[in-house]
Image: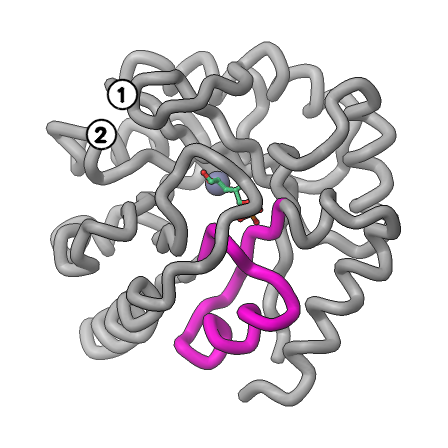
Amino acid sequence: MDIRIAPSILSADFTRLEAEVREVEAAGADAHHVDVMDGRFVPNITVGPLVVAALRRVVKLPLEVHLMIVEPEDHLEAFAKAGSAMIYVHAEACVHLDRTLARIRDLGCRPAVAINPSTPAAQVSEVLHRVDRVLVMTVNPGFGGQGILQSSVPKISWLAAEAGRRGIHLEIEVDGGVDPETAPVVARAGAHQVVAGNAVYGKPDRAAAIRAIRESLRNVG
Ligand code: DX5
Ligand code: ZN
């Protein structure tokens, strides 16, 4: 099955970030996933627009910017200017989700909405027409290298069925605990793309790591 893979720089070696992103590009990655955390929406703090802009200067693939921050609407312009191709906001972090997603598109980026494991998929039902993609979190956001929460997997199939029923073109991406063992599970449920942090950047040979995920998907679908 043709599933896209977006390595998350969260597990990369930040002392040599340029070399890291170039390595996964050469290894056949499809996009770069950038995890932005503010120490409020999630317990961890990571990077901001400055790092997105720096990456933009050295990467060829699109930068997908996953905002795990409160009040993301205040920072959309900065992330758009920094060169984000796609901006993900969390449904749980947006009081006016519809407006925020429309604003992302107005800024020239692709809008996506993310949902935590405890959030029902139906919570984004009214904005499916506004987004290019839904990001189903299969871990509680904040840290890389956690195990997948199997209880979140049925949300992938629910979203795929709902989009199909309503004739909405929707991509479904899965984030958290994806590796060669779990990738086929989420692919069978209907995922089009997976984020892989630990399973790619956590391995010494990134090309082999990406190959292992692709190989695991060969007999799916
Ligand atoms: C979790 C982040 C993920 C994370 C995934 O808060 O949103 O993108 O980096 O890492 P792995 O693949 O290691 O679970
Ligand atoms: Zn993420």
Q: Residue at x 24, y 18 (%)?
A: 71
Q: In this view, does 23 lie to the left or right of 162?
A: right
- In the image, the segment drawn in magenta is 174-197
Q: Tag 1 or tag 2, which sits nearer the N-term?
A: 1
Image quadrant holding the N terminus, namely: bottom right
Q: Distance between the residues labelled 2 and 1?
A: 5 Å
- Residue type (three-letter) at the residue carrying disc 2: Ala
Residue 26 pos. (x, y %)? 87, 48
- Name the residue nearer the viewer: 173 or 83: 173
Q: Is residue 139 left or right of residue 161?
A: right
Q: Residue at x 61, y 51 (%)?
A: 196
- Residue type (three-letter) at the residue carrying disc 1: Val
Q: What element carries label 1?
A: loop
Residue 154 pos. (x, y %)? 29, 72
Residue 32 pos. (x, y %)? 64, 40
Mark 1 Cα-neighbour bin, 10 Å: few <14, some 14–19, many ≥20:
some
Residue 45 pos. (x, y %)? 47, 18
Q: Which residue is drawn at 45% across and 57% down?
A: 174
Q: What element carries label 2?
A: helix
- Name the residue nearer the viewer: 124 or 36: 36
* Location of residue 209 (image quadrant): bottom right
Residue receiving disc 1: 70
Q: Which residue is drawn at 19% across and 29% down?
A: 94
Image quadrant holding the C terminus, namely: bottom right
Can residue 182 be seen in this snapshot? yes
Residue receiving disc 2: 93
Can residue 72 be seen in this snapshot? no
Q: In this view, does 124 lie to the left or right of 209?
A: left
CB contact under 8 Å: marks 2 and 1 = yes
* Location of residue 28 (image quadrant): bottom right
Q: Is 99 a magenta residue?
A: no
- Which of the colour schemes (rainbow, by chain, secondary structure, one colour) is used? one colour
